[in-house]
Image (cartoon, rainbow, N blue to C red):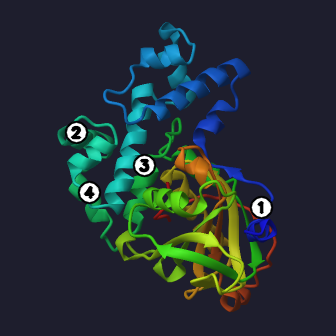
Amino acid sequence: MDRSVTEKMAAPTSYANMVPEDYLLASLAPVWRVRMKRAIDFLQETITRIPPPSWEEVAEESAVSPFHFHRMFRAVFQETPSQYIRRLRTRRVINHLLQENSSVIEVAMRFGFSSSQALAKNLRREVGMSASEIRAISNSEDSTLKDKLLLKLGHPKSQSDQCIEAELAKNIVFRVEHSPEIFASVEEIDQIWFDALDSFYQRKLKDKPEPALIIGKTSDLGKNYNAQTFWIGRHVNDNKQANLIVPAGTYLCCDVVINSISAYTAIWDALYNKLLEDGLEPDSNGFTIDIIQNPKDVLSNSPGQVHIRLKLDEKRSAVEGHKPTPIRKKTGSRAARII
């Protein structure tokens, strides 16, 4: 693909980092930043291991004395190593349960639980729900139930009920900009998002420096996940290669670095607040577009750079007197599909 075409798709000014671990590590002295970063990297690398690594093993891996490690980890990340790994596993399990119909035992084995009973016990402890109750949320007409559940599994913030992801979302710079017509070669997503990206990348993008597109309908916003339609694909140069054409128009946009569904949920909450603050309105016949700049990194569980677009109703938004200039988000508060 023509590189200039890719660059025209998204030319972000800067990315808002929505990775809470990066935020918490930033204030540490360099030597401790390296050690604690190695600790969380090791925990994430071994997230599906049965049994999970002991905190003494994590301490050794990160070159910290076991005598001090447990207290140091909790001081930095505001939860113990075991609480951290349980929360990450639980979030992945819940995202899978909301999108797939795999048996509970299959889900347990995939995400590092020794049995379906162990998974059930973990879910009850972490979120107070069973697997069937979580799956019922995906069919609920109230889409906020899912959002609240996923935000509950965000990184805990000291002395607050709000997760760090929601706090970081307050710093996102949103902007209104015109997007040219986009020609895309896509296929409908009929499986969990991460698996769909992996399959598409292996077949279409491997060894190519191209972003991946995830496209949805604005008319689906607010519907339960099972009632929404999403496509995954890539940008192509003309309509002869395309099977989906996204019309030119005005979009509300932001650029973010994310590593979790909790962060993605917080971003959509902030985006909806931006609509309310600035008198903007989504185009009911338009599209939402996620441009994943580094799909290879995302598939290796590294943070992903994502350019998010929501099509605006230009006439109805103009009635509110909106001026399309960048405005920093001042107060924080939806999501369905990523990581």
For this view, does 336 lie left or right of residue 50?
right
Q: Between 1 and 163, which is closer to the camera in this rendering?
A: 1
Residue 82 x/y as whole percent:
39, 27
Distance between the Cα atoms at labels 1 and 2? 43 Å
In terms of sequence position, does the residue under pointer 1 or pointer 2 come before the other? Answer: 1
In terms of sequence position, does the residue under pointer 3 or pointer 2 come before the other? Answer: 2
Distance between the Cα atoms at labels 3 and 4? 23 Å
Q: Which residue is mark 3?
A: 152
Where residue 222 sits, quadrant-wise, is bottom left
Q: Which residue is mark 2?
A: 121
In the rendered view, would you say 265 is above or below 114? below
| Quarter of the image that includes the N terminus | bottom right
The crowd level at tag 1 (other Cα within 10 Å; few <14, some 14-19, many 20+) is: few
Q: Which residue is mark 4?
A: 102
In terms of sequence position, does the residue under pointer 1 or pointer 4 come before the other? Answer: 1
In the rendered view, would you say 293 is above or below 225? above
Distance between the Cα atoms at labels 3 and 2? 18 Å
Q: Which residue is mark 1?
A: 12
